[in-house]
Amino acid sequence: MDKRVETAAHSAPLTHEDIRSILFGIMLAMLLAALDQTIVATAMPTIGRELNDVTHLPWVVTAYLLASTAVTPLYGKLADIHGRRVTLLSGIVVFVVGSVACALAPNLWLLVIARFVQGLGGGGLIALAQTIIADMVSPKERGKYQVYFAAVFMASSVLGPVLGGVIAEALHWSVIFWINLPLGLAAYWMTSSALKRLPRHERPHKLDVAGALLMTSATMTLLLALSWGGTYYPWASARIIGLVAFSVVLWAVFAWRLRTAAEPLIPLDLLANPVVRMGTTAAGFGMGTFIGLTIYLPLYFETVAGMSASASGLGLLPLTCGTVMGATLSGRSLTRLTHYKRVPVAGLSVATLGAALLTIYAGQMPLLPFSLTLAVISLGLGTMLPVATVSIQNAVLPHQLGTATAIANFFRQIGGALIVAVFGAIVLGGVGGAGVGLSPEALKLGTVDRATMIELFRYVFAATCFGFAMALLLMVRMKELPLRSSAVEAAKAAGGE
């Protein structure tokens, strides 16, 4: 066994109480990050009015997105270098400090800066939580715990928009940031002592600072282009083309850095690992398409189904709740099935078929069958989530868990941003053959022709079908390795390298 690796074989096994304490703590840490992405959205109009700046309001969301996405891989690498406990607790502290700064911000631009700081803390919380579960529980049993994470996301999706609107109207918009203070302190207290019992897998590493700066800059530049394109500036404008070109150059230099650095930010053996590559890309297509649907379906409900703005949010419930059910089914199957890929392959097949039905019957399907179709789609997609995560973690060495998990989450976020941009290009730019797009002003004023919206969403649903089909293809091609059933097996795998 490699003497640089400390594994569970050298530490007392975690008791059920230890696992439960750590699990509740990291779920609370995950809730901090997941809830923040949904609770702010409905409070933004109130924030804009009170801070007297509606024009630059989207930066409140964009700043958090840029920071949280860009630092996600860094958290994984730091966790592999310095350990999970110190990295997670540092993320919680930065997130809480950013939240307090948001609550105290006297104007919009200081709020934007505070949101950027908040994103620097929140960017690694979800990936670190998944990594810590991987440290505690063998891959064979790990799928059962992914269900708890899915429940956190469902709770944040359902409660976040409601809480944001109620707090902004009944109390004050700053309260949506102040509530992170007790939540963050509770997460810190619940995990600080319990995480000392975690098995240690880190090795002596050096952080590739140049590579980190290159990757962060490339990510932020790309996300700026995707955020501004089709809204602030036309996709073919010099600004957007310039940002995309600059991002491509930065990614090319980053790729060169990976090949030449003594210890690259992302180990080349991770990128060469076929399970990591296929699992990450499949999850990127699947979750990216899901995120795109959640963003644009309310527009379909309002313009095609004739629902109110508040009711359109409720229309998303079948899409969010079904995902948890699918993840639960798939996670539990990991402990019993040898060929565990069969469940997500079947689920993604059903999701692809459901998206095809939406494409064919766009605008013709009554609300009840439409909602049932969404539930079936999300149920099928949910089956992929625990299998993709556990398969990636099962395919790497224990000291690479943090980096591999963070990279998988990073590409899910990038995939989401890319696919949301594609959906936006279809709706706002008429890309794909719909013939005509819509201006953001027309959408705000509600002067939208229903027939046009049906035609545009036919292409959105076709893109959805394609996204799920790609996730299915990649999941089929992903190698099905036997799941390790104990930490000792992981230690032997590490020692065999």
Image (cartoon, grey):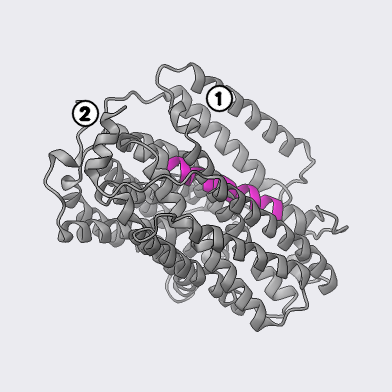
* Residue identified by numbered label 2: 1
What are the residue bounds of the magenta stretch? Answer: 406-423
- The CA span between labels 1 and 2 is 32 Å
Dot 1 or dot 2: first in sequence order is 2
Residue 261's image quarter? top left
SS at mark 2 in the image? loop
Q: Residue at x 59, y 77 (%)?
A: 310
Q: Nearer the viewer, mark 1 or mark 2?
A: 2
Whole-percent x and y of residue 418?
64, 47
414 falls in the magenta region? yes
Q: Is residue 252 above or below residue 463?
A: above
| Numbered label tally | 2
Is there any visible trace of residue 164 in the rendered image? no
Most foreground residue, 312 or 379: 379
Q: Residue at x 27, y 52 (%)?
A: 137
Point out the image quarter for the C terminus: top left
Whole-percent x and y of residue 268?
46, 26
Residue 452's image quarter? bottom right
Image side of residue 233 versus residue 393, left or right? right
Give the residue type that dot 2 points to: Met
Secondary structure mainly formed by the magenta segment: helix
Q: Residues within 10 Å of mark 2 (few under 14, many from 20)?
A: few
* Residue identified by numbered label 1: 255
Residue 1's image quarter? top left
Question: Which circle marks residue 378 in the picture?
Answer: none
Give the residue type that dot 1 points to: Ala
